[in-house]
């Protein structure tokens, strides 16, 4: 780390961890690669859920075995209703996220570009943001019942804030020199947004989107579960109340897999946008 | 003068919005949107009256219990997982999966196991908000600076002292980020856990008001919940600013330099 | 008192093997002030980490007072180049200096004495309650030096401690280090890539080649003990010593067949 970066010889510079735990390649390939270990971890989880209920260490009355959950999952996959519910959830999630993202980006850029607006709205944003979106549930039920609008209301409210906050950070991060240069070359307002503000804010927007996507999924499923909009959450509530415990677990697994996919996809997109962006930065803590 | 200006900016928009709500709703005959004055009457009479002890307090107690359990378990496991690379590799996909499960979906399952009493609600809150705390702590522990770590080693700071003087403080900014995320999840779960089956609590009371069409009271309950969310996040920020004063100072110094 | 015997370090990478340090042997005497100078990319940092027990050598051993070093030994302190990363940012200057002493179980009264003395010795008495990041780079490095001094080490290792500070601060810190060495009589090994600095500071300069590192020369610095940035550096003897070290560093490598590591042909090719 102390030597100049051009040298090819200082292994400590190339890899600061190399000295801490010098591992030989063959050993790593055999038993300790993250992929292998991670797979072992997942298998162990499945195995535990198979054995513990069988031995009644976990009461089998409440904990079906992995194979029972697996069978219920396969059963679900064969039902058209399941796919309809999955699509309902994804549709509500995607539409809500889209509306929240567009609103968050537009408002974020408008507010962020003006010092006056930023100061004017700061306290209001700070007040509204921490209001838990579930506070809106009674209102959503009254106004929309179980129509998709009630789900959208919750999803949009919850996923709007992460995008807005990140965009505000992003717009403030614009290099003042770049801003002055743009002004000096008489870029108009739109050109400044297009060529200066937008590229700087883009990685922040992606971070906001990743956070929002996860929150939106939580609220979509929650809304279905609590309000009863059609979707995975509702299906889960029905399964539980009819005592189909294996199906309940299977649907929890499905919602978890859906969540993992959403996280992976948005993390990938975020990394893609960050890869060309020069400013590597820590995630702005929300 | 500068103070007045800041004051004006901070209060300006909220006051305008409040006034707007007051005026537009003053003669409202819409059943769902009662006059703000009625809502505020109910807020004072009900929510700052008997319901404070009957509903708000039980909710807050459960929130505190669940959050505390999640913090202790999440930080402990996070430190372990962040310290041992093998353990991290082993558990990472499992943790990613648990984190990705929308926490409210475990409510139906936990209801089966723990019934509908306080235990279930506390477990729901603890289970749901543990993941962001755990994962952020692990990330913070993993990212301890190598030079700082070498420094500690050369001065033979090891074991408990290493944990206390190096690992925990070094991971504390990330830990705080996890705790902050966890807090908002915890509030959501506090409400959700009371919606299914409960005899008291903020979420229970609000839904009760909505079902019995006590609309001003429902609005007042929503405002109460909003206030609570706001106050808790304010409290968190105050604590964090004291706790991580060094970190915010360091960041400012780095940005300036 | 500190012996380096045939130390060799080979890094096993995924695709290639890099020999960072090859067969180094030298000894530091009690109370000696030696400088280790080598070009950027010589395994200086690797060697220092091995000497301090942070890194295991592939071959050879390091002995401190006849005892093999296999982990950071007691009685050894290091000052790293990265002052911003070697101080605990959540602790005040004072706490940073005091922490190692607490670990050493030094009694509170003696601890206070040592901390006060060393902080005053580096000229930071009036900022002892500040956080490190509130100080300039040079001042932060003074804190790291104070921490090392307060620890009362038998050996003080310094890894290019002034590479990241400006020239004026650097000159001040060089004189500070000499002054502290006089006062506390601690055996010091100072690693640098700056030839002038190595000649100016110590009693002896060990010249390293580029990687894989071998010792090129071991030069006794016979400059008068009383040194001064202006006069010492302009003296004819300083120029001679400087030239000697310079020549040794820039002398091309004799490519004797034995010097080529059969395991690392790619590395030789990229040189």
Image (cartoon, coloured by chain):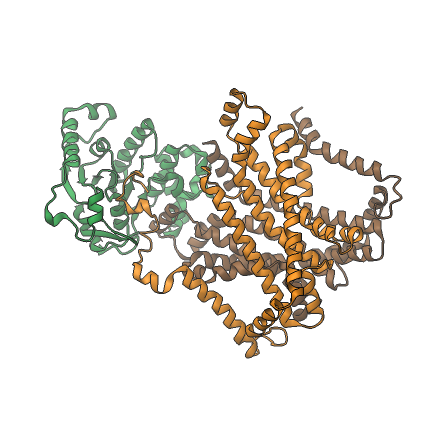
Chain colours: A orange, B brown, C green
Horizontal side of B57 relative to C253 (left or right) equals right
Horizontal side of B65 relative to C225 (left or right) equals right
Q: Can the viewer see residue C154?
A: no
For the residue pair C14 and C104, the one nearer the viewer reads as C14
Specify the farthest residue to the bottom.
A55
For the residue pair A202 and B135, the one nearer the viewer reads as A202
Q: Position of residue C57 (x, y in %)?
A: 24, 54
Q: Position of residue A232 (x, y in %)?
A: 66, 61
Task: Determine whether A172 is above or below B159 in the image.
Answer: above
Dividing the image into 4 quarters, which one contains the C terminus of chain B? top left
The image quarter containing residue A160 is top right
Q: Can the viewer see residue B246?
A: yes
Q: Position of residue B119 (x, y in %)?
A: 67, 66
For the residue pair C231 and B67, the one nearer the viewer reads as B67
The image quarter containing residue C186 is top left
Horizontal side of A247 relative to C16 (left or right) equals right
Q: Residue at x 62, y 65 (%)?
A: A251
For the residue pair B46 and C179, the one nearer the viewer reads as B46
């Amino acid at each position: 780390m102390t030597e100049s970066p051009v040298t090819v010889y200082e292994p400590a510079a190339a890899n600061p961890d190399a000295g801490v735990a010098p591992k030989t390649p063959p050993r790593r390939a055999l038993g300790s690669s993250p992929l292998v270990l991670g797979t072992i971890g997942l298998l162990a989880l499945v195995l535990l859920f198979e054995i513990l209920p069988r031995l009644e260490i976990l009461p089998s009355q409440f904990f079906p075995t992995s194979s029972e959950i697996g069978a219920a999952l396969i059963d679900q996959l064969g039902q058209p209703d399941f796919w309809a519910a999955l699509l309902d959830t994804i549709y509500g999630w995607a539409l809500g996220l889209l509306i929240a993202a567009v609103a968050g980006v537009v408002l974020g850029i408008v507010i962020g570009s003006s010092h006056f607006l930023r100061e004017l709205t700061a306290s209001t944003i700070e007040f509204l943001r921490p209001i838990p979106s579930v506070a809106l549930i009674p209102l959503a039920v009254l106004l929309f019942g179980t129509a998709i609008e009630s789900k959208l209301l919750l999803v949009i409210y919850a996923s709007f804030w992460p995008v807005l906050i990140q965009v505000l950070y992003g717009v403030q991060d614009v290099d003042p020199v770049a801003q002055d240069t743009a002004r000096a070359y008489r870029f108009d307002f739109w050109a400044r947004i297009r060529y200066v503000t937008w590229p700087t804010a883009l990685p922040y927007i992606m971070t906001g989107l990743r956070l929002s996507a996860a929150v939106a999924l939580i609220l979509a499923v929650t809304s279905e579960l609590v309000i009863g909009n059609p979707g995975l959450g509702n299906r889960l509530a029905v399964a539980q109340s009819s005592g189909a415990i294996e199906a309940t677990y299977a649907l929890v697994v499905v919602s978890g897999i859906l969540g993992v996919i959403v996280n992976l996809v948005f993390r990938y997109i975020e990394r893609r946008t960050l890869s060309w962006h020069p400013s590597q930065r820590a995630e702005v803590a929300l | 003068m500068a103070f007045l200006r800041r004051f004006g900016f901070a209060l300006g928009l909220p006051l305008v919005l409040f006034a707007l709500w007051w005026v537009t709703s003053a003669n409202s005959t819409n059943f769902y949107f009662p006059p703000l004055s009625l809502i505020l009457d109910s807020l004072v009479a009900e929510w700052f009256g008997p319901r404070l002890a009957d509903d708000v307090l039980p909710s807050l107690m459960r929130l505190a219990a669940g959050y505390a359990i999640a913090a202790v378990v999440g930080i402990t496991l996070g430190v372990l997982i962040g310290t041992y690379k093998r353990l991290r590799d082993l558990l990472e996909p499992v943790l990613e999966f648990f984190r990705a499960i929308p926490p409210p979906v475990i409510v139906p399952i936990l209801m089966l196991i723990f019934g509908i009493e306080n235990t279930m609600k506390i477990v729901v809150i603890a289970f749901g908000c543990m993941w962001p705390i755990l994962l952020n702590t692990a990330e913070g522990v993993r990212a301890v600076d190598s030079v700082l770590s070498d420094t500690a080693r050369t001065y033979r700071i090891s074991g408990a002292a290493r944990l206390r003087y190096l690992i925990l403080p070094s991971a504390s900014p990330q830990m705080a980020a996890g705790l902050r995320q966890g807090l908002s999840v915890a509030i959501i779960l506090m409400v959700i856990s009371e919606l299914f089956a409960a005899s008291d609590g903020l979420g229970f009371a609000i839904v009760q008001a909505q079902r019995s069409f006590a609309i001003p009271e429902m609005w007042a309950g929503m405002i109460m919940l909003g206030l609570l969310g706001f106050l808790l996040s304010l409290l968190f920020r105050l604590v964090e600013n004291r706790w991580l004063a060094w970190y915010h100072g360091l960041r400012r110094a780095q940005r300036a330099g | 008192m500190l012996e380096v015997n045939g130390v060799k370090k080979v890094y096993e990478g995924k695709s290639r093997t890099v020999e960072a340090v090859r067969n180094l042997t030298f000894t530091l005497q009690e109370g000696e002030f030696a400088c280790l100078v080598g070009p950027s990319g010589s395994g200086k940092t690797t060697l220092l980490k091995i000497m301090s027990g942070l890194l295991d050598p592939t071959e050879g051993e390091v002995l401190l007072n006849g005892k093999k070093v296999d982990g950071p030994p007691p009685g050894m302190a290091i000052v790293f180049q990265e002052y911003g990363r070697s101080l605990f940012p959540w602790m005040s200057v004072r706490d940073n200096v005091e922490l190692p002493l607490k670990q050493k179980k030094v009694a509170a009264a003696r601890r206070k004495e040592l901390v006060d003395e060393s902080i005053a010795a580096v000229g930071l008495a009036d900022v002892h309650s500040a956080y490190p990041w509130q100080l300039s780079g040079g001042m932060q490095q003074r804190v790291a030096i104070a921490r090392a001094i307060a620890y009362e080490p038998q050996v003080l290792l310094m890894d290019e401690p002034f590479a990241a500070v400006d020239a004026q601060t650097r000159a001040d810190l060089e004189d500070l280090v000499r002054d502290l060495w006089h006062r506390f009589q601690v055996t010091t090994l100072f690693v640098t890539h700056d030839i002038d600095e190595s000649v100016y500071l110590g009693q002896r300069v060990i010249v390293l080649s580029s990687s894989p590192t071998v010792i090129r020369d071991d030069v006794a610095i016979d400059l008068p003990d009383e040194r001064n940035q202006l006069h010492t550096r302009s003296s004819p003897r300083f120029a001679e010593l400087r030239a000697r070290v310079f020549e040794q560093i820039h002398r091309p490598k004799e490519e004797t067949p034995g010097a080529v590591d059969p395991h690392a042909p790619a590395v030789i090719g990229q040189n």
